[in-house]
Image: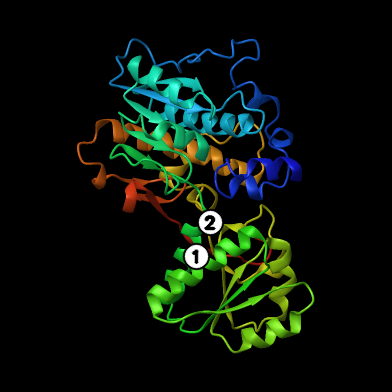
Amino acid sequence: MMTWLTAAQAQAPDYIIQLNAAPLHSAAGAAVRAQTAPASAPAVAPVAKPLPAPGKMASRVKIGLLLPTESRLLGEAAAVVRSGVEAAHEVDPQAEVVVIDADEHNAAQRYREAVAGGVNVVIGPLSRTGIAAVARYVSVPTLALNAVGRDVATSPKLFTLALNVEVEARQIARLMREDGRANPLIIADGEVLSSRLKQAFADEWRSLAGKDAQQMEDNGHNLSELAVAAGQADAVFLALEPAEAARLKPVLLPELAVYATSQISTRTPDRQLAGIRFIDMPWFLMPQHPAVKRYARPASTLTLQTERLYALGIDAYRLAMQLATSRNPASIKLDGVTGDLKLGRDRVFDRQLPVSLIGEGE
């Protein structure tokens, strides 16, 4: 799996692929694979079977779902996103959805063919290289599902909904500030994801407080030093995986405020993590919220990280519906299953996540 992760990191949705601890197919199973285009389909076929609309209802919106469904590296991730789109379509079937297989090599061609075929809003691409290939041809509202590189051609109709760690780290910095913390300590471990969290938090804290936050690295052998440094802070941000956080948390003072992003989430939290404030999607933290429970859960058990792609698909469909009909995209807001969404700078949809507290065994 680690070999697969390393090869896919540059293309895959930020942090979902990097954090997934098991192959997608081990959790998604045949149900996910069945949702991709048939293996016998011609490789050049641009359009898969449209999702059915009920009865004879005329669709006002035609959505092109541009995903690498046949990709060896990203095909199963694309299938999970598609499943989320289908779940949202079942609740609000006013649009016609056309699934278009496209990878970074043919994404531009498939995009132009879809628009020529009447698609008036596009969800995708999923990979950064696919987005870069499509960007110069964007002519209808297009919701990319990954970060758009700074060297990519800009377009007033190219929008972004991505799941990336930087957004969460910046929210934690703001949350600490709102809680009255003045002297936080960042504890990271040198891994790529941890370093990204650390940097995003540090940048946001400097912007908010006008000074740098303290930083220390957990090298696996310096628990006592970390405990001493934490004792001189009024809050700690753990940019660590759950296992490392569970090893460190018991040595911190019980009254010390400890924060983390959704990186720390597990379906069965270690009791050692009790007391940590963290943020995560409403999809996981608020399953009974009216805006969440109306959507079907995945038909097959997914890993926690892969299920985030399913939730991404749900919100992508909902935003696409609004983008297709709104005369003022800047006014779009959504009580989403991935967070409260609103359009921010550079046409990126910002996500505000709910805050929770890890209790004993929950």
Residue tagged by mark 2? Answer: 165
**Could you tell me which residue is drawn at 20 percent across and 36 percent down?**
327
Q: Are marks 2 and 1 in contact (CB under 8 Å)?
A: yes
What's the colour scheme? Answer: rainbow
Please tell me which residue is depicted at 52% across the width and 12% down the height of the picture: 45
Could you tell which of marks 2 and 1 lies nearer the N-terminus?
Answer: 2
Where, by quadrant of the figure, is residue 134 drawn?
Answer: top left
**Nearer the observer, disc 2 or disc 1?**
1
User: Furthest residue to the front?
Assistant: 151
Left or right of 211? Residue 242 is right
Q: Which quadrant is home to the C terminus?
A: bottom right
* In this rendering, position of residue 193 left or right of residue 57: right
Res 294 visible: no
**Amino acid residing under circle 2:** Val
Q: Secondary structure at mark 2?
A: helix
Asked if residue 64 is positioned above or below residue 216 in the image, the reply reads: above
Residue sitting nearer the eye, 88 or 200: 200
Q: Quadrant of the N terminus?
A: top right
Query: The disc labelled 1 sits on which kind of residue?
Result: Ala
**Whole-number angstrom distance, CA of label 2 to CA of label 1:** 8 Å
x then y, percent, for residue 93: 38, 24
Tell me the tag on residue 200: 1
Q: Is 36 above or below relative to 245?
A: above
Can residue 302 be seen from the camera position used here? yes
Q: Is residue 17 above or below residue 94?
A: below
Q: State how many labels appear.
A: 2
**Image location (x, y in percent) of residue 315:** 43, 39
Mark 2 neighbour class, 10 Å CA radius: few under 14, some 14 to 19, many 20 or more:
many
